[in-house]
Image (cartoon, rainbow, N blue to C red):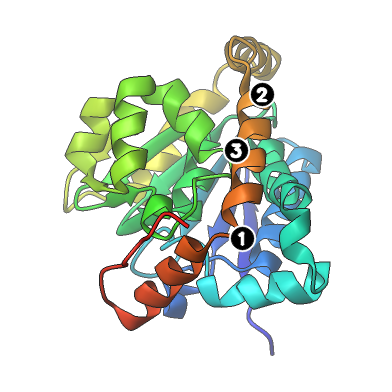
Amino acid sequence: MTQSLIVVEQREAIFEIRLNRPEKRNAITFEMWQEIERAADQAERAEGVRAVIVRGEGSCFSAGIDLASLMDVAQGFGENWKSRMRSITARYQAVVNRLERLEIPVIALLHGHCLGLGLELALACDIRLAAEGAKLGLPETLRGLVPDVGGTTRLTRLTGPAVAKELIFTGRSLDAGEALRLGLVNRVVPEGDDLLQVGKALAEEIARAAPLAVGAAKRIIDGLFDSDRGLQIEGWAQSQLIASQDLMEGIQAFFEKRPARFTGK
């Protein structure tokens, strides 16, 4: 029996979306990404849902994109896929946009590693709770790319330009405490406390409010920012970087577990 890469479950007013590839630290494939979009559709259609929880099974939330799955992109979009990078990026962005634009509040529960595409998924959620010991970061520049699935845009919206520039320029990972100080997460759950139970308690508190009012408040707050332009710029930048020699070097260095030797070409 094939294991579901994304598990969905509704319990009364709470709808859960779980990344379910623990043996690979929930590294995200294109197939998983498509399933996340379907899960968001299910959450919107389900009766009585007042909050959505997104979390990862196993040792972490998500280690980011599965670099080996880039070959799947080539198969899915054809041998000239690099020339269509803006369209591909838009497909990936559409998934987190779908999650962000649910009128239902979405809570991300972060533990272990939450990196790259995993953090971009979390940034599209309304509220982020992090377990003590969690590590968050956008390491794309260390591979020769930019965070192009909303990471650059949403991180800047949360932290302001100066902090976003430092984190993205360096590709540095943050611990949960620093992420809280910089505004990436709403709360750090101490070691020994049950992150899921804390998340459910918050979801239940939200569920006691009037759903139409909560949905309207979410749309108003999100409407204060021009995210669409930022996402378009991300897609344009990635379409240039995808053909660079630095990208090939960054990926090879990652698999060989050595520092990359970038040349700016």
Which residue is pictured at 41% across the width and 41% down the height?
A: 199
Q: Position of residue 9 (x, y in %)?
A: 63, 56
Q: Which residue is mark 2?
A: 229
Q: Residues within 10 Å of mark 2 (few under 14, many from 20)?
A: few
Of 232 and 202, which appears nearest the observer?
A: 232
Vertical placement of 115 versus 52: above or below?
Answer: below
Mark closer to the observer (1, 3): 1
Which residue is pictured at 69% across the width and 49% down the height?
A: 89
Element marked by disc 2: helix
Element marked by disc 3: helix
Amino acid bearing label 3: Glu
What's the CA distance linking mark 2 and mark 1?
A: 23 Å
Of 207 and 45, which appears nearest the observer?
A: 45
Say whether marks 1 and 3 touch (CB < 8 Å).
no
Q: Which residue is mark 3?
A: 234
What's the CA distance linking mark 2 and mark 3?
A: 9 Å
Residue 209, image quadrant: top right
Answer left or right for 218 relative to 42: left
Mark 3 or mark 2, which is nearer the start of the sequence? 2
Mark 3 or mark 1, which is nearer the start of the sequence? 3
Amino acid bearing label 2: Arg
Q: Which mark is residue 83?
A: none
Q: Which residue is mark 1?
A: 243
